[in-house]
Image (cartoon, rainbow, N blue to C red):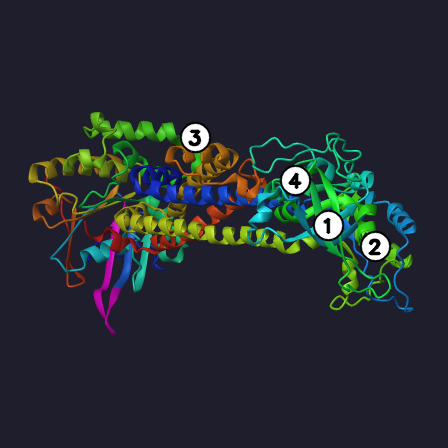
Amino acid sequence: MANSSDTSNANGTPGPDVILSGLGIRRSFPVGERSLEILHGVDLELGRGQRVSLMGASGAGKTTLLNILGLLDRPTEGEVWLDGQSAWSLTTQERARLRNASIGFVFQFYHLLAELNALENTLLPAMIALPHVAYRNKREEYETKAVSMLKRFGLGDRLKHRPGQLSGGEQQRVAIARALLLDPPLIIADEPTGNLDSSTGERVLELLFEEQETRRTALLLVTHDHRLAQRCERMVHMEDGLIQADSSHTMPT
Amino acid sequence: MYRWFLSLRYLRARRTNWIGAAGITVAVAALILILSIMSGFLQESRDHLRGNLGDLIVMPNQDYPLSDGLLPKTDEASLMEIVRANPHVRGASMQMAWYGMLVPDSKSSLLKHPVFGDLSLIHLVGIDVPDEYGASDLRENMKPTEDSSSFQVIPVTDPQRPFDPPPFYRPDGAPKSGIILGAQLAAAWNLHPGDEVELFSLGVDPITRSIEGQGCNRTFVVTGTFRSGENDMDMERVYVDRRALADMLGRTTAWSQILIKLHDYEADKVAAVSTLRSSLAEGRFVHPPSGNDESDYFRTEVRTWEDLRGNLLGAIKNEKSLMGIMLSLVMVVAGFTVFAILSMMVSEKRRDIGILTALGAHPSGVMSLFLMIGCWQAFLGASLGALLGVLGAVHIDAIETSLSNTFGIQIFDRSIYLFDHIPSVVEVTGVALIVLGAVTCTLIFAAFPAWRAARLNPIDALRFE
């Protein structure tokens, strides 16, 4: 646990260098009359700009932890701090806003909206963030940003295509553009290449790492792929609802 | 912002949404159409039911003594003076009403082969001519009609002297007094001006006030017909000169009721009835109100024409509200359609709801997104339905005609109601209420699926592809 809690203040509040911090997280689900504990007290802290891989066998609790760290699920016990705010002491409204502004999600199955084209899917976080009039005023700004990002991702001639007309790799690139639109300080990627063939997956990953590096965004990457995990500066290994190993190493160039 | 954008996208993407809107359209259009026609019927029927009744009718009850034991007074001149002195009264006419039987002369084939129901009781009304024109619509109803109905009015030769025999009438003996028949009655007996008819009736003994088989009869000559539009009146009523009727019946009191026309019926009816009641009671012509509503029979001595026709008017009003209630069920069915469509959409869009939540949408935002889809359906359906309903109500006649011509059947038989068109009155408040009701109903039905969408756990929604 070399990296945990050494940047925290004495009172348990994470320091300014910490973007995401989970403290003593437990999560149990009711199964019949008893409850089944999936996470047995996980401490995990992510520094700003850090690239961290989260590995573990199926059933180790990765997804549960990810949902909690992504503010989609409430821990039974413990605290989640995101960008200096204790997520579960906020109102649902504030938490939704925090998730909108501070986390970019990249899912295994892309999760684009089928009714929207590539550009509209990319713009979705901004549409959620702003009310009608405010969005209309800033629409051009966001559109320029989204278009240039999609062009950079090689999707310049795919702007008006619906997800159904795009390949898996293209869809995932749109999803990455969507995650990056509001420049969140944290990207959570859940097996982003799990559904892609290896060469496509490789290209998507290149793109994600490249963007992460230039923007100095923190990245929490869940993967089964050991080689992929090697390319992160820090590897966290989970087993049976606990963090078993947390190691930093210098990045291979 | 995403709510507007996505609700429109979802609306366009799913064709079933149009079915929801179409259901609302049908419900709203049907409600507006039917209620407009019912309003039209009500209005038209009011005109027709009124027939030759004036605004108010005074029917003193001569059977009960006043509090001092004497019967109410019957003096014509001072009675009319009291009535005419009332500031609300524009015209008043004294009438004598009685019952009798009418038999045409022998040239009628009907007499040789009477059909059951043809020889029914006739309502005899004795009138004073210039007065009656000022108190009822009789003068209007004696003018020639312009529609294709089988009951055409045959106007009298000189409306100012309607009971004078027509110039071509050549009497066998002494010239007879004239009689004006209801148009339906005249048509049924095939009677025309110049034909002689015999009236039979029973007289009342002026002293014992009882009918003691004192049959009386007199021959009259038909001078013309009237058509009030009120079925019973046109079938059963005849007008003769008041003095001639009193003479035939051998009565000393030559009147039984007074017909009154007000300056402004709708505005003054309540005040006019109560002032007439008190001034007539003061003049000892009617019984003073006892103050007890339950047993106050004498209140009915001064009535509005609506009181007289209350049952029929009430029946049409009842029909209208019943139709409204039944057709509101169509709206509820349309609401169920919206409910089903939105529920389906919420299930189908589980993943999208999860994605939106992950991207920072608040549950209330998700809820309003789906409510908004319901809103669009309600808005589209209600406005299209209002448009169709109003257009349909305005052009119902042309629509019915073209439908009748296309299918070769008569959908609406105008001669039954004596309407030359299908009546329909579009009430703006009614339309507004229906549209408002449709939108509210749809939103209530949309609320449940929208609420379910908002409660959806994003983790479950995102878990599987």
Q: What kind of residue is marked 2?
A: Gly
The image position of residue B167, as x and y in percent, is 75, 30
On screen, residue B298 versus residue B340, left or right, reads right
Q: Which residue is mark 1?
A: B124
Is most of the magenta stretch helix, strand or loop?
strand
Q: CA distance from mark 1 to mark 2?
A: 14 Å
On screen, residue B395 versus residue B207, left or right, reads left
Q: CA distance from mark 3 to mark 2?
A: 95 Å
Find numbered disc 1 in the image and state the secondary structure of the residue it sits on.
strand
Mark 2 neighbour class, 10 Å CA radius: few under 14, some 14 to 19, many 20 or more: some
Q: Which residue is mark 3?
A: A137
**Which residue is pictured at 27% across the width and 63% down the height?**
A24
Q: Nearer the viewer, residue B437 or A171?
A: B437
Q: Nearer the viewer, residue B168 or B133?
A: B168
The image position of residue B133, as x and y in percent, is 78, 39
Find numbered disc 3 in the image and state the secondary structure of the residue it sits on.
helix
Find numbered disc 2 in the image and state the secondary structure of the residue it sits on.
loop
**Which residue is pictured at 53% across the width and 45% down the height?**
B35
Instruction: Look at the image and give the residue range highlighted in magenta.
Output: A27-48
Residue A33 drawn in magenta: yes
